[in-house]
Amino acid sequence: MTSPSEAPDALMQREIGEFAALLRQQGVHAALRYLNGRTPHQYTGVFRFDADMLRNVALFDRFQPTVQKGGDAPMGETYCSLVGQQQAPLEITDASVDPRVQGVISTPVVSYCGVLIRDTQGKAFGTLCHYDMQRCEERTTDMPLLQAAAGMLYQYLG
């Protein structure tokens, strides 16, 4: 439980440690559940770039927690493609009013928060992201934990 007096850096280090322990002891799905518990988004997933397709590797759905994998999607219909192209994190609170994505991506996803996962050579492998079909509040505090988690996830995806 978070203490009101806990410094942001200490809190982040504790959460990174908790994520790492869950990933090591219980696997990717449990680790995604942990990340999802810190966001208002329905889904938290790991996706792999595969030419013109985005492949789902692992998924946590807060409304169907037993689901462990979702569907694949054409790359051009995903915000993950933008993370890959820009090699940078992306957060979209409401795609219907965000000029960065209007007319660029055609997807039912309204809110998105994603970071790049790199392979052992530093090349773009895919993304770790939260997403939802409804508008979610801005969560800039999710980014540092997602980035730290993405750095750990690649070795567990094999």
Image (cartoon, helix red, strand yellow):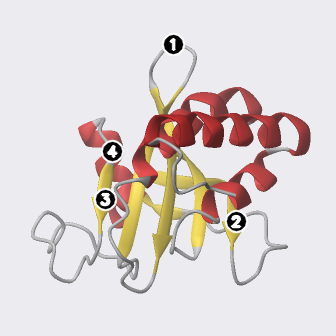
Which of 75/13 is in front? 13
The residue type indicated by label 2 comes to Phe
Q: Secondary structure at mark 1?
A: loop
- 129 sits left or right of 96 in the view: right
In the picture, the quarter occupied by the N terminus is bottom right
Residue 115 position by quadrant: top left
The residue indicated by pointer 2 is 60
Q: In front: mark 2 or mark 1?
A: 2
Q: Residues within 10 Å of mark 2 (few under 14, many from 20)?
A: many
Instruction: Work out whether mark 1 precedes mark 4 in sequence or the reverse, and give the earlier one.
Output: 4
Q: Residues within 10 Å of mark 4 (few under 14, many from 20)?
A: many
The residue indicated by pointer 4 is 89
Report, in whole angstroms, how far the alpha carbon at label 4 lies from the one at label 2.
Answer: 20 Å
Residue that sits furthest to the right in the current view: 25
Report, in whole angstroms, how far the alpha carbon at label 3 lies from the one at label 4.
Answer: 7 Å
Q: In front: mark 1 or mark 3?
A: 3
Instruction: Work out whether mark 1 precedes mark 3 in sequence or the reverse, and give the earlier one.
Output: 3
In the picture, the quarter occupied by the C terminus is top right
Which of 133/141 is in front? 141
The residue indicated by pointer 1 is 121
Q: Secondary structure at mark 3?
A: strand
Mark 3 touches mark 4? (CB < 8 Å): yes
The residue indicated by pointer 3 is 91
Report, in whole angstroms, how far the alpha carbon at label 3 lies from the one at label 2.
Answer: 19 Å
Report, in whole angstroms, how far the alpha carbon at label 1 lies from the one at label 4.
Answer: 19 Å
Instruction: Work out whether mark 3 precedes mark 2 in sequence or the reverse, and give the earlier one.
Output: 2
